[in-house]
Amino acid sequence: MELDRRLLLAHCAAHALSVIAGLLVVVPLALNGSAFKGRCALFSQGFWRSENQSASGAQLDAGTHLVVQQWGPPAACQFATFVGVFTVLYGATQSWRSLFYLHRRHDDTLFSAFLTLLLSLCVLFLSGGASVILTLGLVSWCNTVTDHNTRPYSCAESQSVPLYLDVETSSFYSELTCAQVSLWCVTALWLVHSILSFLRLYHSHSQQISGPCLSREKELLLGQSHVDCPLQCQHPHPPQPPAVFI
């Protein structure tokens, strides 16, 4: 198997994995957004309030409930969702494109390979930023839910504890954690895309430089052509001195 076919197969497999990882980002975030009625839990601010009720002249403790002062900015959730959706669409398109190239036995042009590398690097930084935002936002929400780890349960256990909010909180930790892990996987896959795109660009550049020279030298060796090779392929011989007759 030639080098370009190995790179195409590796790139095709990476794009297929990107589709799966992107779906594991988009679906949990969509479910969480639906459960939270379009609100974003990331970076939300709140506190726990204790309430007492009087009954028959006696004070009875009614327990505590979480009060959300300010929900997180919607852009924090939308940014991670955008990276996931773009990864799914781009991965599906490039997977089909790579399979088409494998069937046709050819690769990208030099300019197209350069654009692919540039796009991969840009989305790598975007996905890395989205991963950091999602991670920090989940930590902030967990600090709010557990009252900075002073509650008798962890953040994972708090999804089974009544928070007395007007949103569904029975699976928020599972959904956000799945999206967080998947988004870091997406970032790692975009790093793989960048490396493979660079290798394909280098391979295309090498083929473009060495291709004409190799074909010209082959023709000269076979005696099929006596046309001079281009300047970068020439191997000039030193001029012979003129013969002197006495």
Image: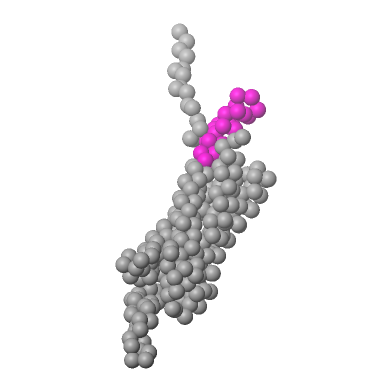
As drawn, the residue found furthest toward the right would be 103
Q: Nearer the viewer, residue 9 or 36?
A: 36
Above or below residue 11? Residue 177 is: below
Left or right: residue 29 compared with residue 101: left
Q: Give the mark count.
A: 0
Q: Nearer the viewer, residue 81 or 108?
A: 81
Residue shown at 48%/77% (left/top)? 167
> Is the image coloured rainbow, by chain, by secondary structure, or in one colour?
one colour
Above or below residue 183? Residue 109 is: above
Task: Residue 243 in the image: state x and y as whole percent.
Answer: 47, 14
> Which span of residues is magenta-colored?
203-230
Above or below residue 107? Residue 235 is: above
Task: Residue 119 in the image: state x and y as whole percent.
Answer: 48, 56
Residue shown at 54%/39% (left/top)? 207
As drawn, the residue found furthest toward the top would be 246
Task: Residue 168 in the image: state x and y as whole percent.
Answer: 50, 74
